Amino acid sequence: MSEKIIIASDSTSDLNAELIEKYQIKILPLGVFIGNKQYTDGVDIDPDMIYAQYEKTGELPKTSAINIAQAEEFFESCTADGSSVIMFSISSEMSSTYSNFCLAAEGFPNVHIVDTRNLSTGGGLLVVAAAEMARAGDKTACEIAEICREMAPCVDASFVIDSLEFLYKGGRCSALAMFGSNALGLKPCITVKNGKMGVGKKYRGKFEKVLLQYVAERIGDGSDVRLDRVFVTHAGCDESIYMSCVEKVKELAPFAEVHITRAGCTISSHCGRNTLGVLFVRKQPI
């Protein structure tokens, strides 16, 4: 087909530089505020800067949605040469970014907005799938966008958190829940379903051992899992920790691609350094 298709995403898809370069994916970053100063996610601030600031001041950042004007400017630059754009956003249940994208796209008939119904590499799985279809060249941008919308409910996205400290500081859990979790040594699994985050199983024990149990339970025997790719996404864990999870993933199922990615500012500022998830696509909606 002659249609030139650009695949784009907001910065919450947490794709690594290798994948962004391979598929020429365009990233539109969210804003990050620390105090009265604004930064741009992945441009002039990264998670390690957030952690350093927190250790120094006890202050966590706030993220801001991409506004309509920013989206319009982005779409105009992408479509100037006649290209079509498939634009992926963090779940509409978690941010106004999706609705802002939709409003901005009203003036661009060749821009297609996809609500990933997810966050982090849960959305990244859809972005890469779209990029592969665009590269194959046998589908229109509209067709690819619709396939990705249908795939979104099949994405299995979850993270295990070592400590509720950041969630508590950010006002996302109570002091009682934090105290109870710490006292019992619980490591909650945060899952995404119907576009929203919720608490799944609560593991107990050392973080490193909990993660291996978590990975085994999420993948199971792999019979209902699409084996094209899986992401092991972490928010700054030690290499030994995330590599042990990678080896466990490879032991459990013959994924064609196993990608290690570092979570960006959004996940990191909500969950903290010792957070790790295994994210993949199932054959059927969850």
Image (tube, grey):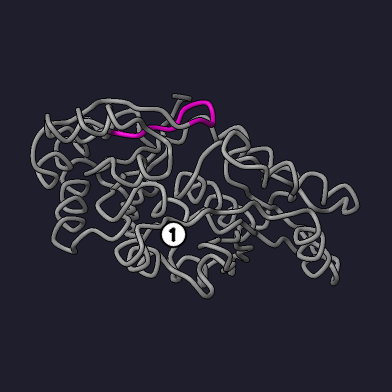
Foreground of the two, 164 or 176: 176
Which residue position is annotated with label 1? 264
Start-end of magenta stretch = 189-196
User: Could you classify mark 1 by the number of other residues whose Cα lies within 10 Å: few (under 14), some (14-19), or many (20 or more)?
Assistant: many
* Residue drawn at point x = 25 percent, y = 25 percent: 201
> Is 58 in the magenta?
no
Location of residue 99 with respect to 121 vertically, above or below? above
Location of residue 247 with respect to 198 vertically, above or below? below
Residue 277 picture quarter: top left
Where is residue 69 shown, x and y percent of the image? 81, 59
User: Secondary structure of the magenta portion, mostly?
Assistant: strand
Specify the quadrant that holds the N terminus. bottom right
Left-right relation of 282 to 104: left
Location of residue 98 with respect to 1 vertically, above or below? above
* Residue drawn at point x = 61 percent, y = 53 percent: 64
Left-right relation of 184 to 96: left
Specify the quadrant that holds the C terminus. top left
Q: Amino acid at mark 1?
A: Gly
* Residue drawn at point x = 19 percent, y = 41 percent: 252
Where is residue 237 shown, x and y percent of the image? 23, 58
Residue 134 picture quarter: bottom right
Query: Residue farthest to the bottom?
Result: 44
* Residue drawn at point x = 59 percent, y = 33 percent: 93
The residue tagged with tag 1: helix, strand or loop?
loop
Where is residue 33 shown, x and y percent of the image? 55, 61
Foreground of the two, 83 or 182: 182
Foreground of the two, 100 or 87: 100
